[in-house]
Amino acid sequence: MPPRTRPGTRREGEAIEVGRLLRRLQAEGDRLNSAVATRQGVNQTDMSALMHIMEADLAGQPLTPTGLQRVLGLSSGATTSVIDRLEAAGHSRRERDTTDRRRVILRYDEGAREVGQRYFVPLAREISEILDGLSDDEAATVHQFLAGVIEVYASHSARVGRGEHDAVPPA
């Protein structure tokens, strides 16, 4: 994982610029997800839920309804409504866990696969073209950096969720 930059370190200026670029990336990702959601006739929350369901399923760690509720920050009733809408649209399904029949897991379905093929495979091809212009070492560095940033975002999000930064004055 890349070293963390703290104010006053030699990479502070670079960290500020990288932070700006990451915010732009997040904003563009939000715009893309909004556009896809609009094209698919679903709302932003449903699109976000579908992305979480797909990512977890593809990683071999499918979400439960409670897990989806946690990542979306919704009530159980609102989460059930999201799952119901995604099922009705053919994007996801509920399954019984094969190891614990009491547990329900969420899987992405053919509708979500089609959305991915239509909208996100072309994006992956364009990103692949960028990576093709890098050396193997450079591509590995990009991967390592992004994986580290994701870890930092996840841990920071958890701290913010616990209220750890509420009393800290802005820098």
Image: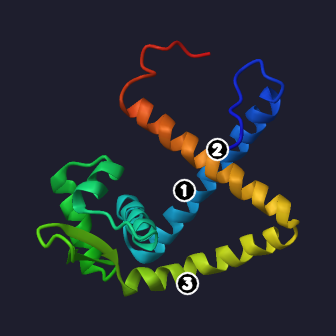
Specify the amino acid type for callout 2. Answer: Arg
Seen from this angle, which residue lies furthest front? 99
Secondary structure under tag 3 reads helix
Specify the amino acid type for callout 1. Answer: Asp
Do the residues bearing badges 1 and 3 touch, measured as CB atoms within 8 Å? no
In percent of the image, x 66 and y 74: which residue is there? Answer: 124
Tell me, for residue 30, which label it has, or none. 1
| Category of crowding for the residue at label 1, using alpha-carbon neighbours closer than 10 angstroms: few (below 14), some (14–19), many (at least 20) | some
Secondary structure under tag 1 reads helix
| Precedes in sequence: disc 3 or disc 2 | 2
Image: 171 above or below 42 = above
Cα separation between marks 1 and 3: 18 Å
* Residue linked to disc 3: 118
Name the image colouring.
Answer: rainbow
* Residue linked to disc 2: 23
Image: 68 above or below 160 = below
| Category of crowding for the residue at label 2, using alpha-carbon neighbours closer than 10 angstroms: few (below 14), some (14–19), many (at least 20) | few
In percent of the image, x 67 and y 46: which residue is there? Answer: 22
